[in-house]
Amino acid sequence: MPIYEYQCDQCQNEFEKLVFNTSEKIACPKCKSKKVHRMMSAFAFSSGGKFKSAASSSCGGCSATSCSTCGTK
């Protein structure tokens, strides 16, 4: 059961939703509009053996377990 990130097309509210069924209609918790779209998650992902984070992709020295540029482990 994945957690997806959405943005409301009507009020621009960003929210997360635990999705049990892919055909489930998602509504904005703020304005109740069903005009929402799923956003690309800020969750980290791996591409070509290098670790990349959608939240901060400027580092460039990261591997799957640590970052030689910023020192993150």
Image (cartoon, rainbow, N blue to C red):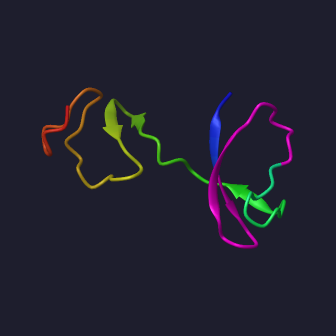
Looking at the image, which residue is at 33% across and 53% down? 56
Residue 57, placed above or below residue 73:
below
**Which residues are drawn in magenta?**
6-25
Q: Is residue 18 magenta?
A: yes
Which residue shows up at 39% across the image and 52% down it? 55
Query: Is 35 included in the stretch rendered in magenta?
Result: no
Residue 20 position (above or below residue 30): above
Exactly how many numbered labels are in the figure? 0
User: Is 12 placed left or right of 52 in the picture?
Assistant: right
Q: Quadrant of the C terminus?
A: top left
Q: Position of residue 4 (x, y in %)?
A: 64, 43
Residue found at the far front of this picture: 30
Residue 15: give x, y in percent of width and height. 63, 54
In the rendered image, the residue lying farthest to the bottom is 11
In the depicted view, which residue is nearer to us: 2 or 66? 2
Q: Where residue 23 sits: x, y (%)?
A: 86, 38
Could you tell me what secondary structure mostly forms the magenta stretch?
A: loop
Which image quadrant: the N terminus?
top right
Whether 36 is drawn above or below 70: the answer is below
Q: Who's the residue at 23% across and 50% down the image? A: 59
**27 to 20, vertically: above or below:** below
Residue 13 as seen in the image, left or right of residue 68 = right
Q: Residue 18 location, x and y as percent?
A: 69, 37
Corner quadrant of residue 17: top right
Based on the displayed image, in which of its 4 quarters is residue 29 positioned? Answer: bottom right
Residue at 80% over, 36% down: 22
